[in-house]
Image (cartoon, grey):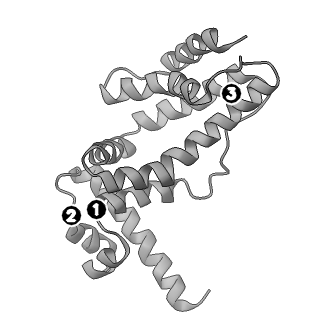
Amino acid sequence: MPDSSRRNENSRRAILTAAFELAGEVGYAKLSIEGIAARAGVGKQTIYRWWPSKGAVLLDAFLMLSEGDGGGLPDTGDLEADLKAVLRATVKELRDARYDLPMRALSSEIMHDPELARMYAERLDEPVRELKKERLRKAVEVGQLSDVDLDMAVDVIWGPVTVRWMQRGPLTEEFADRVVETALSGLRP
């Protein structure tokens, strides 16, 4: 890797790490390109050259966190156990104080910024949704699920956890398990 590419990658990672950390420390309203630049040790112009807004920087920070994630949902042959494991991990992440404020900030900004919403859908939500649908599609193929609308099934399974998080309700592993059990009771053949 040429030195300039390595420097660019190091700067990119420093910027994304700084954005994520600052969003958690000061909240999105007080997050600024100037603050990110200072924390990352780069000039503001570097950030403005690579990202159109602080929301776009924060989105890329979340994407960086998932780099190296093998992708796909577990497939042990036991759909219920696999979904419980995934929802439990989701609950754990949503309850993690390091992620809470940055995720809330990104969620809020997406509602107000159509371009950021488009980027979020294209780069994060749709690819993750496809991984979820692929796991459910396999379950349909082996008779563990009825032939259902997979988009609706994803919403039925993951939606309650998202809503409870947004409303700051209690998120527990037991809740995640009940969501899976309830959803599957309606989705199984």
Disc 3 marks which residue? 82
Q: How many marks?
A: 3
- Is residue 176 visible in this depiction of the protein? yes
The part of the image, by quadrant, that contains residue 89 is top right
Instruction: For mark 2, give the secondary structure.
Output: loop
Kind of residue sitting beneath label 2: Ser
Q: Is residue 173 left or right of residue 141?
A: left
Q: Nearer the viewer, mark 2 or mark 1?
A: 1
Earlier-in-chain disc, 3 versus 1: 1
Which disc number belongs to residue 14? none
Q: Which residue is at 54% across, 13% downward?
A: 178
Kind of residue sitting beneath label 3: Asp
For this orientation, the residue located farthest to the bottom is 3
Disc 2 marks which residue? 32
Whole-percent x, y for residue 171 in the image: 42, 23
The part of the image, by quadrant, that contains residue 136 is top right
Earlier-in-chain disc, 2 versus 3: 2
Q: Which residue is at 58% across, 90% downward?
A: 2
Disc 3 from disc 1: Cα separation:
35 Å
Kind of residue sitting beneath label 1: Lys
Q: Which residue is at 32% across, 80% downward?
A: 42
Instruction: For mark 3, give the secondary structure.
Output: helix
Whole-percent x, y for residue 104 in the image: 31, 41
The part of the image, by quadrant, that contains residue 154 is top right
Which disc number belongs to residue 54? 1
